[in-house]
Image (spheres, coloured by chain):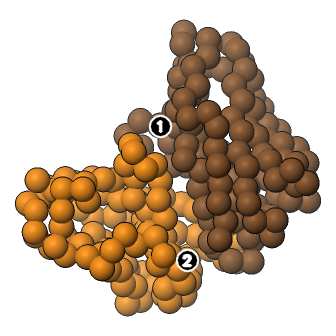
Amino acid sequence: DAGVIQSPRHEVTEMGQEVTLRCKPISGHNSLFWYRQTMMRGLELLIYFNNNVPIDDSGMPEDRFSAKMPNASFSTLKIQPSEPRDSAVYFCASSSRRALNNEQFFGPGTRLTVL
Amino acid sequence: GENVEQHPSTLSVQEGDSAVIKCTYSDSASNYFPWYKQELGKRPQLIIDIRSNVGEKKDQRIAVTLNKTAKHFSLHITETQPEDSAVYFCAASFLDNNDMRFGAGTRLTVKP
């Protein structure tokens, strides 16, 4: 298995533009998580899905952020409109609730820079 | 919801010394406590975990301890090496769901 796949790996955009981050979880995993990492705030959970259903989106900073999981193998995190303070590394992670533990496997991350 | 506090935020030790990172959690229902290591520019990866029915677990130079009563758990690294330098995150979750909350991280530097 290739592990969790995220695209793009780097994104540079201008303030006001729409940004879409993509994630493909590990095949067979039924939970998917979106995190944002910054120096100031550390690793923040934005939203997570179980069986494609959003369970907790309380970490989504504001209405400019939205996430979808249309099927078990794909999720998107969208920021519209983007702002400079959204600059961060965004990680997607997946796990299996059938596993003996809740180990989350992280993707390589998307480094977002909003100018 | 669960709240995880982690200390210290930075830790610098000499090679060969021990390092200890401590975390507390708020939800007594949490029963799974993993530790992740994130090297510079890389993704977080699980290095060791402990369940609430165990008080201590060891894997070579790494050990974790759990005090359920006090809601504390700690990571111990002995005989530290420069390659142990990284950011370490503790986390707490309930095994029946996948809601895992991470601590703020500890940046460990091991000086040769």
Mark 2 element type:
strand
Residue to which mark 2 is pinned: A31
Image quarter hosting the N terminus of chain B: bottom right
Chain of the residue where label 1 is placed in the rendered structure: B
Residue A97 appears in the picture as rendered? yes
Q: Amino acid at mark 2?
A: Ser
> Where residue B77 appears, x then y in whole percent?
72, 28
Q: Residue B67's spot in the image, x, y percent?
A: 88, 48
Tally of marks = 2
Q: Nearer the viewer, residue A57 or B34?
A: A57
- Tell me if I can see residue B57 in this picture: no
Residue A77 is marked as: none
Residue B15 drawn at (x, y percent): 62, 12
Where residue A82 appears, x then y in whole percent? 18, 67
Left or right, residue B52 beside residue B95: right
Toward which corner of the image does residue B16 lie, by quadrant? top right
Is A65 placed above or below B100 here?
Answer: below
Instruction: Mark 1: give few (<14), some (14-19) or many (20+) Cα within 10 Å.
Output: some
Q: Residue at x 54, y 84 (%)?
A: A55
Closest to the observer: A97 or B108? B108
Mark 1 on the same chain as mark 2: no
Q: Is residue A89 above or below residue B106?
A: below
Task: Identify the residue at horizontal 49%, vertical 85% (top origin).
Answer: A54
Q: Colour of chain B?
A: brown
Q: Quadrant of the C terminus of chain B?
A: top right
Query: What is the chain letter for disc 2?
Result: A
Three-letter residue code for mark 1: Glu
Q: Colour of chain A?
A: orange
Q: Residue at x 69, y 59 (%)?
A: B92
| Residue B46 shown left or right of residue B33 in the figure | left
Which residue is labeled 1 in the image? B39
| Pointer 1 with pointer 2, Cβ within 8 A | no
